[in-house]
Image (cartoon, rainbow, N blue to C red):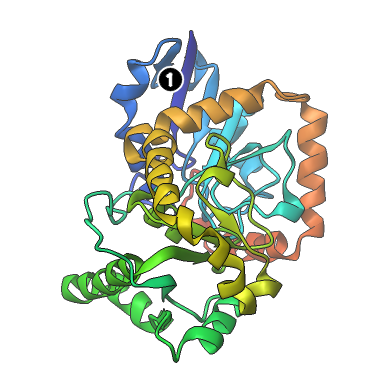
Amino acid sequence: MTRVCLTSLFPDNPDNLWNRGSYTALLKGAGALNDTAGLQLTEQPDDADIVLFSDVGGVPGLLVPFMSAYRRCWTKALVYSDADFPPDCLRGVYASIMRTRYDANWHAGGPYIREGAATWSSVVLGAPLKLFTFAGSCETHPVRQKLLELYGESGLVLNSNRQRVTAAFSAGSTAEIAELRRVMEVSVGQGQFALCPRGVGASSMRLFEVMSMGRAPVIISDEWVPPSGPNWNDFSIRIAEAEVEHLHELLEPHRHRAHEMGVLARRAWEEWFSPDVWLKRTVEACISLQKRPGFGKRIPLMKKWAAGFGCSTELRGAVRFLKHRSRFPQSFAK
């Protein structure tokens, strides 16, 4: 029996602004986890075999080892993060880990886990009229800008202005959010393939959204690391960022398989990435990482932590976070 404690880096501040959405979303799967043979959820870190911290998205990895909640159980601790630039000096499951920083003994890929995330699994799509489509913010990465330049005039790519998207979700504008989602739904429905270009991070929530809708995803990200589980080659196509101007030529030979691939994508999503299995699959990935060399050993952790000082993103994030340390006065307590 493997006992798992799902917890927070900020137990004294349950309303923290960083990444609480992942914690509450995973917690909803507690019942399903306890029904799984060999797995059991416990509230006490001392009683657990694995302690999973699921709200580290806003905390630089260089600082996590100094936080009291992590220090108390570091020999059995793993993290989940869906941050665009995750704290990858820590062992854990990451939605957007970069290929150039990926270490199979240290990291596992995973889906985006977020409380209140849009649900597309009940969407009924019509017959596709185009070979491929994309609707989303095109300002988040150069490859998206390139797609807009190449295919915007033909209507294959639609730009949802980033400022508009940010303003809608920040203000909680129900009507505006509903309209953005409607545009995305219509776009996906019109294409035999759904483009899933990377955003700020190496991955994109769009990948899992289109899988849930039963469309074959076209993954455009040179840094993307596929989450373990399904056979991605069965239902998805990967295209290099430098080859986006040749999308018609690259996708046309697969047109006859598009519907079948979409069906397989939906099945893979249900089995590996749907909210019902979020916690179970994350814990399974953690168990696999726990068996890798060096787990629970101080020297490997210190080496990874020291390597983080060579990452400018980590250093800048640590400085910004420390400026707001007063928000969480007990987080670094002895």
Image vertical order of residue 305 relative to residue 281, above or below: below
In percent of width and height, residue 35 lies at: 32, 15
Q: Is residue 328 left or right of residue 183?
A: right
* Callout 1 crowding tier (Cα within 10 Å): few <14, some 14–19, many ≥20: few
The quadrant of the image that shows the C terminus is: top right
**Residue at left 45%, top 49%?**
261
In percent of width and height, residue 291 lies at: 68, 20
Q: Is residue 154 left or right of residue 184?
A: right
**Residue at left 32%, top 49%?**
115
**Residue at left 52%, top 62%?**
324
Displayed quadrant of residue 124: bottom left
Q: Disc 1 marks which residue?
A: 44
Tell which residue pokes out farthest to the bottom in this image.
153
Q: Nearest the camera: 74 or 278?
A: 278
In percent of width and height, residue 275 lies at: 33, 40
Q: Is residue 152 left or right of residue 309?
A: left
Image vertical order of residue 262 relative to residue 293, above or below: below
Residue 333 visible in this rendered orientation of the protein = no
